[in-house]
Each structure stands twice: as C-alpha cells, then as structure tokens.
Image (cartoon, rainbow, N blue to C red):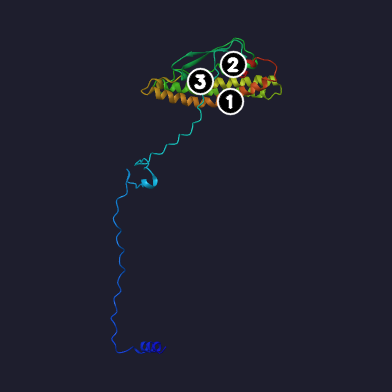
Amino acid sequence: MRLSIAVILLAACGGSSKPAEPVQPRLAPAAPPAPAATAPAPEMKGGLMWDEAANGPAPAWTKERPAPTPKPPAPRPPRPAPIYDRLLDTDGAVAGLSGFSTRRVRDPNRCGGQAVLTTRGKKIAPTDAKLVAVFALEFPVDLDFTDEAKKEGSKLKFSRFVNAMTTTLGAARAQYEAEFASTDPGIKAAAAARLSQIYVRGASLLARAEIPVDVRTNAVATEASAVFCETLEDKAAPMLALGLDALESCRKFTLVAPAGWWAELCKAP
C-alpha cells in the first residue's frame, strides 16, 4: 500500500532524479506476408475462370452474345379486293330495265383494262327515266391535257361530264330515296335496288375511266397511269360502298316483300 502511494506522489511531483527512458517512435504496422504462390486456376476459352473440380466440365462458351431475335412485324389488315372485282358491273341484262344490258370488253386504255358497253332499250317507263339517264352517262374519251390544240377542249369535256354526272345521279337518288321512305316492303325493296344500281354505275364510270392520251403515252406512262387510276379509284370507292349498303337493305326487305324484278339483283351471294 505504501509503495502504491509513493508511486503516485512521484508521478505528481515530477518523479525522481533518474532520467526518463527515451520514448520509442511509433511504427506503422507491418504489412501482412504475401500469400504463397499458387498454380493458376484453369482458364476456359473466353477468359472466364471455371473450377472444374467443383463445378464439373466447363460449359461451352460463346465470346459474343447472340443478336436478339427480332420480333415479327404486326400483321397488316387484309387489303380489300381490287375495286374492279367488286363493281358488280357484270355482263347481262340490267335488272328492272327491259332491253338494257351491259357487256365488258377488253380495253388497255382504260383503268382496270376493261370498258363497259351499254345496250339501251327503246321503251322506257316514266318512273325509270332518271335511272336510264344514269346509264346514258359515259366517261369522256381522247382527253389530252398537254397538247396545246386539245387541252382546252379536254378540260371542257371533262368539266361537262363531272357536272352532268353530279346532276344526273343527284336527281335519280332524290327520286328513289323518296320512294324508299314508303312503308310498303315491295316499294322499299325496289327503291333500294335502284339506289344500288345508281351508285354502282357511278362508281363503274369513274373506276373504268379512259386514261388521257398524254398520261398513257408520256415518258413515265406506267407510273402516271397508275396515279391517274388510283385517284379515280379513291373517288369511286365511297360511291361503291353506298351501292353495296343499298344492296344489303334490298336483301333485307326482299325477305318480307312480294316477288319482283329486284329479287335476282338483291339475292344473297
């Protein structure tokens, strides 16, 4: 106990006369010994390490990732059949018009490669006069919008045709739409059939137009003719759609209407 108190007092008063031992400098900790050299592990093709003892034979290795399999393109909606296959302007008698018939003939100067020739009867019922006027329409031929001697006359012929077609189809449509308002199934069926004939005839006139001379004979005749015909097809398609809708209405009323001339035209395909 006395020794412990003496040590404390010496430390508090500065200690004894014995010189203090020099302070040893602090050294950085020694670096760990280098690991013993070992044999390199087996390396497979491509530079990856593979422990065959632990994992078995190394798998096959491909240096580069295979390209991802491209996704198949989304299916396109089916294209409608060419308008020339849907026009219903087949050869034979015009339903409900005695003495009238149509016939298709090959004509390479026409869109679709065919012209429709119409034979007209001599006797016409007053109620059919506006429909007959529709069948009398013809797309102008020998148009030439480049030749200086012909272009003004061609513009006039084309303008007159457009005006005549608009007026004639409009008058016929107004008549048969008024008749379609009837409550009589037979009258409705006949009116729907006539409306179908009007629209289909109008679509046929445009879709089977003769290609102008300057279009079908120029340096890029194939491309120019295709553009001309596609333009008229775009104009004819809505008219044809109206004709097919009217035909569908006719089929519906034929089921409850008495037999009539429209039955053959409106029968289900």
In whole angstroms, how far apart are the C-alphas of marks 2 and 3? 23 Å
**Residue sitting nearer the eye, 130 or 205:** 205
Q: Residues within 10 Å of mark 2 (few under 14, many from 20)?
A: many
In whole angstroms, how far apart are the C-alphas of marks 1 and 2? 19 Å
The mark lying in front, picked from 2 and 3, is 3
Badge 1 marks a residue whose secondary structure is helix
Q: Is 137 positioned to the left or the right of 48 in the image?
A: right
* Amino acid type of the residue that numbered disc 3 sits on in the rendered structure: Tyr
Badge 3 marks a residue whose secondary structure is helix
Percent of width and height locating residue 211: 44, 20
Percent of width and height locating residue 236: 52, 24
* Amino acid type of the residue that numbered disc 2 sits on in the rendered structure: Val
* Amino acid type of the residue that numbered disc 1 sits on in the rendered structure: Leu
Badge 2 marks a residue whose secondary structure is helix
Where residue 242 is drawn, which disc sits there? 1
Corner quadrant of residue 179: top right
**Residue sitting nearer the eye, 115 or 141:** 115
Q: Earlier in the sequence, mark 2 or mark 3?
A: 3
Number of residue marks: 3
Corner quadrant of residue 34: bottom left
Q: Earlier in the sequence, mark 3 or mark 1?
A: 3
Where residue 84 is drawn, which disc sits there? 3
Q: Is 137 positioned to the left or the right of 252 in the image?
A: left
Q: Is 120 positioned to the left or the right of 256 in the image?
A: left
The mark lying in front, picked from 3 and 1, is 3
Q: Earlier in the sequence, mark 1 or mark 2?
A: 2
Residue 164 in sight here: no
In whole angstroms, how far apart are the C-alphas of marks 3 and 1? 16 Å
Mark 2 sits on what residue? 132
